[in-house]
Image (spheres, grey):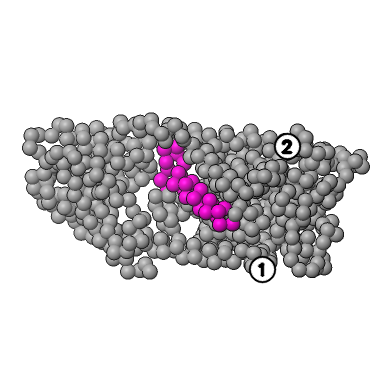
Amino acid sequence: MINKENNSQTPIIERPANYKPPRNLSSWLIGRPLSTADAPHETIGKTVGLAVFASDALSSNAYATQEILVVLAAAGTIAFGYVFPISIAIVLLLTIVSISYIQVIHSYPDGGGAYVVARDNLGELPGLVAAAALLTDYILTVSVSISSGVAQIVSAYPDLYEYRVVMSVAAVVFIMMINLRGVRESGAAIAVPSIAFIVIMFIAILAGMYKYFAGTLGVVIDPPEMHHVEGALVAVTPFLILHAFSSGTAALTGIEAISNGITAFKEPRSKNAAITLTWMAAILACLFLGISFLTSQTGAVPSEFETVISQLARTVFGGQGIPYYAVILATTIILILAANTAYAGFPRLSALMSMDGFLPRQLAYRGSRLVYSRGIVALAILSSLLIVIFQASVTRLIPLYAIGVFLSFTLAQFGMALRWKRSGSLHPEKKEEGSHRVSALHYDPLWRLKMITNGFGAICTGVVMFVFAITKFKDGAYVVLILIPLLIGVLWMIHLHYKNLARHLSLENIGIIPHHATRHRVIMPVSGVHQGTLAALRYARMLSDDVTAVHVVIEPADAERVRAKWETWGGGVRLVLLDSPYRLFVEPILGYISDVADVRQPGETITVVVPEFVSDNRFAGALHTNTANILREQLKNKQGIVITNVPYHVHEESIV
């Protein structure tokens, strides 16, 4: 019906789409489709948020101490005494990084983490570097956590060693299916095992500490074959200690995840996200220090055949009894579910980047369960490929993992340091207005302290990153050093394409639409109002004076922009707004066309005119949905309906 509150001369019609997706196999696997109106109910609280976003950071306790021992093994078992002092230094760095990301959460309440911080404070190129590092980090998070979880199973059941790759890929698919069901359901599914892991690990550590002070702790019985170190033993040098420190900082992985997924939290979301990050950092620090201390006291050794956690558990509990298997089971589950952190962060980050024009626009579309399902599937495919290539080896995957993590840490903290410097230059009674993703910046009396804290943290994480790049270069770190620049190049080419397209479609400095009339009834789907739309509209009005533009309302904010532009550029042609609460595009259009076809006059022909972007660059074509072909396939068997696409050609001279 016509919106009576709209007094403009251009008719704007709002009409709900009554189409509701039917139940099918997809509904059985991932749940019934959710309406856009259900989005506020899909947000999560602090406890579930801890399970969703902290599982990666908490699970790093399972391998962080072991990675320190792997490096120290080069100097022999006598060097294992340094594991606890190194762990204390890592916890200090964890504190600095956590404080920095709490500041990020309050300053950038719409998420984006290091990507948005770097782009806002350092520029577009550093933002792309941070984005490439984060995307790589998330892919490796899934690969490392799943592989580490399967390694725990293999530690308890060595006969399964040959099947570790198949088991890992199956676990990736399983976690993917959980996340396709939505944030709230996936969070509820992993909340219990995540909390169980925390409780069981604290019980194990407290039991170990009790035995240590009682003098009954003992050492590992029948330790496994130690991780092989090539060459002769080396001396304990400052560089070896720094190398071990860098490897142990794997415990920090996942700290940034909450800052990327702030929008998943209930209001006040910044406050809830910051509290959750504080909980996560405190729990992580206590578990990491406890495991490292007991490891140094029990003589656990790094091994591919039995993890440090397994050795520690059977020493503390006096063998492989029920408590031992409880630790192994809890650790295995949390390691596998740690991939959930990446599934929560990667799709949100890729959607944010797609809205900025650095990734295909399709990644910004939410699926039937109000999650970015395309991003979730893409993450599963990429991480599975890595697991197959590196044969599910945690030690081989870790060198790739840490560089991207600490590159994003460094850029985020350096960007925040510059933000505090800007804050100090403001007048105490004035503030700098923020954008839609950035909170307003005002004078902060503690700006010097915050700037120094973030600056020092950036130096520390930067040093760790360079040490990783140097020491792990031949072990596979070179892959990331090549992959990140290549990924930046791909992101930039995608951005150039969208910028070039926007320039060609711009409505600036163009003339009035000429009026034409002919005998046809024309329906024209409209996704947006730009030069391509107006070219199709000119053609439609050449066919008939009876032209109806149809826009499917998926996001209300986008619909308002289309309404405003259409009132200016629509030339008096009526616009029908089809409300689509389940974010479907083709089905509401088809339903509207069928309704019109049912009441048409005898002999009347309905022409569906579809604007189509055409590029001479094949790569660019993959970045756009071909609506004309979809509608033609659906309507080609209906009599009296003609589908025609109006191509708008754009010369992609700026894309290599």
Q: Amino acid at mark 2?
A: Tyr
Residue beneath disc 1:
470
Q: Is residue 383 magenta?
A: yes
Residue at the spot 88% in from the left edge and 44% down from the top edge: 218
Q: Residues within 10 Å of mark 1 (few under 14, many from 20)?
A: few
Q: Which residues are magenta?
A: 364-390
Which residue does the image show at 21% across and 51% down from the upper left?
Answer: 645
Residue 601: x and y in percent read 9, 34
Q: Is residue 419 above or below residue 3?
A: below
- Magenta-colored stretch includes residue 44: no
Q: Amino acid at mark 1?
A: Ile
Residue picked out by circle 2: 325
Judge whether residue 277 can be spotted in this image. Answer: no
- In the displayed structure image, the side of residue 160 where residue 181 appears, left or right: left
Quadrant placement of the N terminus: top left
Secondary structure of the magenta portion, mostly? helix
